[in-house]
Image (cartoon, grey):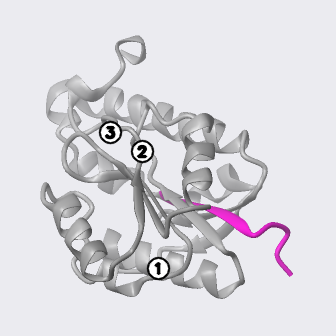
Amino acid sequence: MIAFNQALIVLARDKEITIANTRLKDTVGDFKTREILHQLLSHTQETASYINIDKYVVLEDMTDHGLWEEYIIFPRLGHDAGESMSLAFNLVFATGYQEVVMIGMDCPYLSPELLEEAFAALKHNQVVIGPAQHGGFYLLGMQCFYPELFDFVDAASSDWLRRLLTAIHQMQLRFAFLPTLNVVQELADVPEDWL
């Protein structure tokens, strides 16, 4: 039996894959990139800790298991971000939750207030979106699992938001936006006090 009707899912990417694929590495090198990724991880965990609901994490790198003791842990669920997101939402909703919000670990501006705002938006909307400056997202929430929203998902794609909105309109779902925030993709996205 679930403790709450709300759940939070964190997508925790594999650090080595993230380092290899980030534009940060070319600018600040491996060591500083690892420091920034660690700060993003710490920020995400701290932000989520203020929300008193059930929490899940999708871990691509199981060596990070000890960092997520308060979470229900899923191992890597799919071959790419879209498939992992879809499977995680499906599994969590199948458990009986009525409102589920998913976040990544790459938004240094995510706050507990924004998480609360996302869950509040789900009281009157079927979908809530936290759009990212570069065209992806930092947050996605739903009242139930809509597999059609993941048919095309590439969270890093610059047209992800447009394609998601097209699917939402075709399904005639009510949705709400949170503020647009930056996610860390390159050096300019990193808060100055982290450098």
Q: Name the residue carrying label 1.
A: 77
Residue 178 disc label:
2
Q: Return the x and y of residue 149 as percentages of the image width and height.
A: 33, 78
- Closest to the observer, 34 or 145: 145
31 sits left or right of 112 in the view: left
Q: Return the x and y of residue 90 as percentages of the image width and height.
A: 53, 84
Q: Give the residue type at disc 3.
A: Thr
Q: Return the x and y of residue 10 as percentages of the image width and height.
A: 54, 58
State the image quarter where residue 28 is shown. Answer: top left
23 sits left or right of 123 in the view: left
Q: Residue at x 34, y 13 (%)?
A: 192
Q: Name the residue carrying label 3.
A: 180
Residue 16 disc label:
none
Q: Residue at x 41, y 75 (%)?
A: 84
Secondary structure of residue under mark 1: loop
| Mark with earlier residue (1, 3) | 1
Asked if the residue at tag 2 contacts the one at tag 3, i.e. Cβ–Cβ closer than 8 Å, the answer is no
Q: Give the residue type at disc 1.
A: Leu
Give the mark toward the camera: 1 or 2: 2
Q: Which residues are the magenta region?
A: 1-11
Relative height, residue 180 to residue 52 (above, below): above
Q: Residue at x 40, y 62 (%)?
A: 175
51 in magenta: no
Q: Return the x and y of residue 124 as percentages of the image width and height.
A: 56, 62
Secondary structure of residue under mark 3: loop
How far is disc 1 from disc 2 in space, using C-alphas? 27 Å
How far is disc 1 from disc 3 in space, using C-alphas? 28 Å
Pick the quarter of the image with the C terminus.
Answer: top left
Pick the quarter of the image with the N terminus.
Answer: bottom right
Q: Badge 2: how crowded within 10 Å, few (<14), some, or many (20+)?
A: some
